Image (cartoon, rainbow, N blue to C red):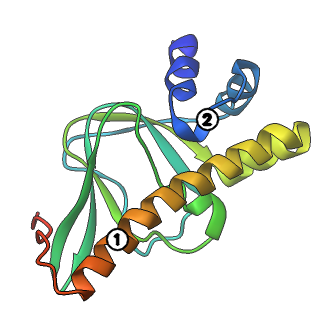
Amino acid sequence: MFAARIELMQQMPIFGAIGAETIEFLLAPAPVVKVPAGGFFFHENEPASSMYVLESGRVTVRKSWQGHDLLLRRLGRGDCFGEMALLDLFPRSASVRAEEDCSAIELSSANLYRLFERDVEQFALIQMNIGREMSRRLRITDDLLFRASMGEPLEAPERL
């Protein structure tokens, strides 16, 4: 099972070019969190100090607006969420709900700090990869915002 987790993480953009030994080091203290269908990994505005790598199941990322939960995205096996917590130390910007029984590896900021103390180059590469992923998402958001401000009709988010 450990080898499967390493392989899963090596396929993710955030852990691209990270060696198996480093991923094994990160995984050693990382708990596996199980959330049943309908449960939440976390809620919007809660304190944040970890990210999750989804091993099994599907989740929805949702944002509250005017008393409604709106769909931001759907994620499945091999996707990660909550990575902003490892960079900005702000509360959660959205909620993540399990749509079916889920299992996820939880990687905390304390866990990454252990890596910093051990191998600053691998730590920096992960931080850069997280930054790249966040930049990619920001570009998509910027494009949507620009198109909306120019009057282009956009598809409204699905209510959940």
- Position of 150 compared to 140: left or right? left
- Position of 51 compared to 158: left or right? right
Q: Viewer-nearest of labels 2 and 1?
A: 1
Residue under pointer 2: 15
Residue toward you, 8 or 154: 154
Q: x, y (%) of residue 93? A: 42, 71
Q: CA distance from mark 2 to mark 1?
A: 26 Å
- Residue at point 65%, 63% (across, down): 87
- Residue at point 44%, 65% (across, down): 139
Residue toward you, 158 or 59: 158
Q: Secondary structure at mark 2?
A: helix
- Answer few, some or many: residues within 10 Å of disc 1's Cα (few below 14, many 20 plus, some between 14 and 19): few
- Residue at point 61%, 32% (across, down): 16
Q: Secondary structure at mark 1?
A: helix
Quarter where residue 152 is shown: bottom left
Tell me the kind of residue under disc 2.
Phe
Tell me the kind of residue under disc 1.
Asp
Location of residue 1 with respect to 148 vertically, above or below: above
Earlier sequence position, callout 2 versus callout 1: 2
Q: Residue 143 shows which numbered tag?
A: 1
